Image: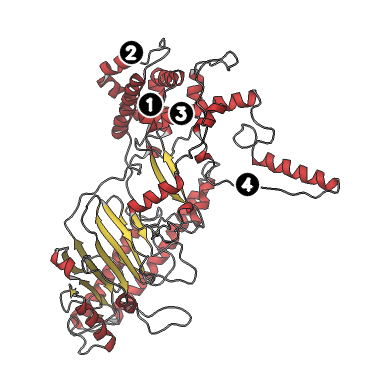
């Protein structure tokens, strides 16, 4: 976790999640606290901006994932006067003292307090009334100081050192032995006049993998190595593979039982997943947050940090600033900034010179940020408290975005009997299956399996017959294997919305690629039959091959101008039905088909 000076933009670190007090931050607002936590750290973190709205205070409830005990509350504070056009003499600490505190919640208040007292800072002999008032409130609520006395937490180039970054814990945190370590670390290269405060809360935990994170780097995978590894794995499992092909996936088989298709699907799926873990490189989080970072910049940064260390060492030893060292540090900093500008310029010119028709549209991302922030408490309606924890937010989104289907009267029963007027069904061809696999996105967002469209394209050259017969038998038997029905849902924010409303999000289901192949193949056939037998109205444009929104706009424009030519007025009635496709009764849809 960390603290930032007044600014609107935050820095994004690969592998770390940014937590802001709220998002988006308005133009005139300047939050001075921010937090980061490592992705995959097996933590449940809940941001509490439901009971405190000060932009200089961040309250986080933190506990291990799956832990049933009460979460620990960490409050990150920047104690300073209020900002704005008409600032008052109210400090951040005044807002904390007005809160209702739960003494049973283990609580730690830490960061930049901007208060000095002889109790912990030997460079002052008295304390101001504001500091005395704050200490009275802390003592009254049982908070105790965690800092070792007289160890500076801030040193500036003028030679002044002070102890203003403080940590306090309440009796619940002290009795539970929550805070294991607390010390000032001057070795971390922050280049700030504040030193780093290290807190160890609880025992070190094990890092876990987020199942939604694609750990395999398919972009840099090698096709020949992939195929070679797949053939070797097939050879190791030759007996089981031949048994499944001969019994379940042979070309002469017309129909298959559900358990047979489930077993064949699981075998092929697990085969590719095992092979991918061996042949495909894993994603490695870059040590720097920028792609243009070079070893030369690392060396320059190390020199700058060394200059800062010499300057602060001189101040601590001689208790007076060195003008020579300060100027030297200033020159090194200036040269490093010049080197950064030069390196960025060279990197982006190199990218532009290598531009192609495939990657040129990615250049627009240079001016945009892809930071993701923790969502605020979600509104549940009037007289109902908002959801705060991760589990509560999941239930709220599921209830609002995946509503239960309405119960209808006289619900029709699907007629599965064959009739003479039914459209004849023809078995799936190998050309259909191949086209469906090879026209899908290669580097799509993978589901739980971690396999992308590229994996199945390459696997087709080795497992062509097995993959084709599996899709054919699933389609001919009217069965969708169980493993293809399992998905993981990712929540995405709609742009420029109020993110305290559940409808400001959309849910994306990540399914297995081969299961989507079967769905896409059937959708193509339905689309073909609907167009061939004129099942679509003439005014339907969406979802029809060869027609688009441009055709709809041209039709509307034509109708309007035709009416104007006959001296008529034109009125339009437009509907936007919320969740229309999510609430279509399946029985009516099947009966219509």
- Other-residue count near label 2 (Cα within 10 Å), few / some / many at <14 / 14–19 / ≥20: few
Nearest the eye: 165 or 592: 592
Q: CA distance from mark 2 to mark 3?
A: 23 Å
Q: Is residue 564 above or below residue 75?
A: above
The part of the image, by quadrant, that contains residue 74 is: bottom left
Q: Earlier in the sequence, mark 1 or mark 3?
A: 1
Where does the image place residue 113, in percent across and percent down from the top left?
28, 77
Query: Is disc 4 in contact with disc 1, using a CB cutoff of under 8 Å?
Result: no
Q: Which residue is mark 2?
A: 247
Query: Is disc 2 in contact with disc 3, using a CB cutoff of under 8 Å?
Result: no
Q: Which residue is mark 4?
A: 575
Q: Nearer the viewer, mark 4 or mark 2?
A: 4
**Residue at position x 48%, y 40% in the image:** 406
Label placed on residue 517: 3
Q: Is residue 503 visible?
A: yes
- Other-residue count near label 3 (Cα within 10 Å), few / some / many at <14 / 14–19 / ≥20: many
Q: Earlier in the sequence, mark 2 or mark 1?
A: 2
Q: Earlier in the sequence, mark 2 or mark 3?
A: 2
Q: Is residue 175 above or below residue 511?
A: below
Q: CA distance from mark 4 to mark 1?
A: 37 Å
- Furthest toward the front, the residue is 409
Q: Which residue is mark 1?
A: 481
- Other-residue count near label 4 (Cα within 10 Å), few / some / many at <14 / 14–19 / ≥20: few
């Amino acid at each position: 976790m960390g603290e930032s000076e007044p600014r609107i933009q935050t820095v994004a670190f690969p592998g770390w999640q940014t937590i802001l007090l709220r998002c988006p931050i308005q133009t005139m607002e300047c939050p001075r606290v921010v937090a980061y936590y490592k992705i995959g750290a097996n933590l449940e973190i809940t941001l509490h901006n439901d009971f405190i709205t000060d932009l200089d205070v961040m309250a986080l409830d933190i506990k291990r994932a799956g832990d049933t005990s009460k979460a620990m509350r960490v409050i990150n504070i920047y104690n300073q006067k209020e900002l704005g056009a008409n600032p008052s003499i109210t400090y951040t600490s005044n807002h904390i003292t007005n809160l209702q505190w739960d003494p049973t919640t283990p609580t730690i208040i830490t960061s930049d307090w901007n208060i000095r007292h002889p109790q912990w800072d030997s460079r002052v002999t008295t304390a101001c009334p504001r500091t005395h008032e704050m200490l009275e409130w802390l003592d009254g609520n049982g908070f105790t100081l965690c800092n070792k006395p007289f160890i500076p937490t801030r040193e500036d180039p003028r030679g002044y050192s002070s102890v203003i970054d403080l940590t306090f814990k309440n009796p619940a945190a002290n009795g539970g032995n929550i805070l294991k370590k607390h010390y000032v670390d001057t070795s971390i290269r922050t280049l700030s006049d504040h030193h780093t405060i290290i807190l160890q809360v609880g025992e070190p935990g094990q890092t876990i993998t987020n199942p939604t994170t694609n750990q395999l780097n398919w972009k840099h995978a090698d096709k020949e190595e992939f195929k070679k590894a797949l053939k070797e794995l097939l050879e190791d499992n030759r007996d089981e593979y031949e048994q499944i092909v001969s019994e379940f996936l042979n070309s002469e088989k017309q129909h298959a039982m559900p358990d047979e298709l489930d077993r064949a699907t699981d075998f092929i799926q697990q085969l590719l997943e095992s092979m991918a873990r061996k042949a495909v490189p894993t994603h490695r989080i870059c040590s720097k947050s920028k792609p243009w970072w070079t070893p030369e910049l690392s060396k320059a940064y190390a020199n700058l940090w060394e200059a800062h260390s010499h300057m602060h060492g001189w101040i601590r030893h001689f208790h007076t600033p060195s003008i020579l060292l300060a100027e030297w540090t200033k020159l090194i900093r200036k040269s490093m900034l010049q080197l950064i500008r030069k390196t960025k310029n060279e990197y982006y010119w190199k990218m532009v010179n290598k531009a192609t028709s495939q990657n040129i549209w990615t250049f627009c991302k240079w001016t945009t940020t892809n930071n993701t922030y923790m969502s605020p408490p979600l509104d549940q309606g009037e007289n109902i408290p908002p959801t705060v924890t991760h589990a509560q937010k999941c239930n709220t989104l599921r209830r609002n975005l995946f509503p239960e289907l309405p119960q209808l009267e006289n619900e029709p029963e699907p007629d599965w009997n064959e009739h003479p007027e039914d459209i004849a069904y023809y078995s799936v061809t190998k050309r259909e299956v191949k086209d469906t696999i090879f026209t899908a996105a290669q580097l799509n967002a993978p589901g739980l399996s971690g396999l992308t469209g590229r994996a199945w394209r390459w696997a087709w050259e080795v497992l062509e017959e097995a993959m084709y017969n599996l899709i054919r038998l699933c389609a001919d038997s009217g069965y969708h294997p169980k493993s293809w029905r399992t998905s993981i849902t990712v929540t995405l924010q709609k742009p420029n919305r109020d993110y305290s409303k559940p409808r400001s999000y959309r849910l994306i289901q990540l399914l297995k690629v081969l299961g989507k192949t079967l769905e896409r193949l059937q959708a193509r056939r339905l689309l073909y039959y609907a167009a061939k037998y004129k099942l679509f109205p003439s005014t339907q444009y969406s979802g029809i091959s060869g027609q688009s929104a441009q055709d709809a706009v041209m039709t509307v424009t034509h109708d309007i101008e035709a009416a104007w030519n006959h001296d008529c007025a034109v009125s339009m009635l437009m509907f936007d039905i919320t969740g229309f496709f999510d609430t279509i009764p399946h029985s009516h849809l099947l009966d219509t088909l």
